[in-house]
Image (tube, rainbow, N blue to C red):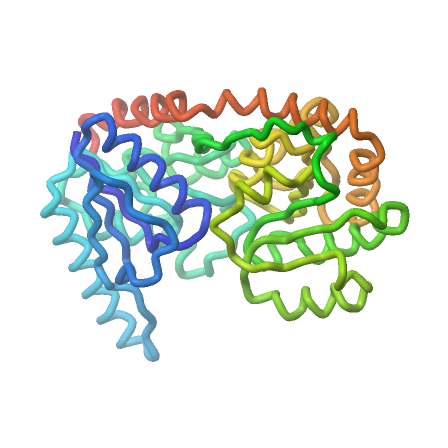
Amino acid sequence: MRISCVIASLGSGGAERVMLSLCTAWAARGDSVTLLTFDDGRQDFHLVPAGVTRIALDIAGTSTSLVGAIRANATRLGTLRRALRNTSPDVIVSFTDRTNVSTLVAVRGLGIPVVISERIDPRRHDIGAAWSTLRHLAYRWATGLVVQTEHVRPWAETHVSPARVHVIGNPLREVAAPAISAGDRTTMIAAVGRLVPQKGFDTLLRAFALVRVAHPAWRLVICGEGPLRSSLEAQRHALGLDDVVSLPGRTSTVDEVLAESAVFVLASRYEGFPNVLLEAMASGCACVATDCDSGPSDLLAHESLGLLVPVDDAVALAIAMTRVLDDAAYRSRLGESARTSTQRFAPARMLQAWDDVFATTRGRAA
């Protein structure tokens, strides 16, 4: 099969990692895989896997006027259309909202099946009125729409027919679970994500300030970068946490951080499918997460695999964190149960789910 994949860039986000994981698996089994990005490829965070052809279109950019925007977008769509037509794909796979719209518009009339995927909860993630309108119009042309949780299925079915909606979780990349259980690890709590309002790190800092009163030996590391760095650093200082909370920035060594950490906390206000929570579970961490839309409740069964708490409730988050910090044996039980449960997201299972989607696209075209 010839598969052409489209994504805006190869930045450090979860969507990029999942697309590369799929590209790797498809190429490894002998499919012809082409990966197209809108950017010029100079800021790649991830390496393109062997066997995958990369085309950096260099069509990303902004315009300062309406006329300029119209002209620029027409040029971009023309470039994308030519590039995709030249790859002669049996199917096109596109990730993320605006990229999906652009891809569907660009290949309209070429007779190529297009499977698009939302990678975050679209009910909570605002892309602007104009793009939302375009999305509602263009998504009707998709031969398949993949969402990551059942929570999002009803939304998807307002954009395409129910038969074209597919729910597929993310494949778990290989994560080496350390021999040391969560109950025997260092007194470190980990959190990972972009420093943006969505991730709720401000709530996490408030919760950790409460936790620290009874657990002064514990420390918190928040890995990631983003526009809220200054405000989070200021909040850390105001709460007197400078010596126990680190913000090391974006890192390529998340696995090492998770392997060292006894506890992982996801404080998000909303998610799509939180890859890092799945990876923390596979690493055997005892996990505490907000019961946000959507994702955490699809991964964590409350009490048996981890703890779920209300969104934006620092006190509830602190109480849950304290429960796992108080009891090393409980941490170990949660970590081991969570690690075992992640096998339902084994790559082979997720790849088969995508193959099932491809099978339904035969005879359909955008």
Q: Is residue 345 visible?
A: yes
Classify 236 as above or below 100.
below
Residue under the point 37% across and 23% down: 353
Image coordinates of residue 97 in percent, x first then y, are 39, 50
Horizontal side, residue 101 vs residue 30: left or right: right
- Across and down, in percent, residue 307 comes to 73, 32
Which of these two is toward me, 130 or 58? 58
For the point 74% across and 66% down, which residue is it?
Answer: 235
Give the x, y percent position of residue 67.
27, 76
Q: Is residue 83 above or below residue 242?
A: above
- How many marks are shown on the rendered structure? 0
Q: Can you say which quadrant of the picture contains the C terminus?
A: top left
> Camera-side residue: 144 or 265?
265
Report whether residue 366 is seen. Answer: no
Residue for point 16% across, 59% down: 78
Q: Compared with residue 202, is residue 140 higher up or lower down, i.e. above or below? A: above
Q: Is residue 51 left or right of residue 274?
A: left
Q: Is 164 displayed left or right of 297 in the figure?
A: left
Q: Residue furthest bottom?
A: 64
| The N terminus, quarter of image | top left
Residue situated in front as seen by the camera: 127 or 2 = 2
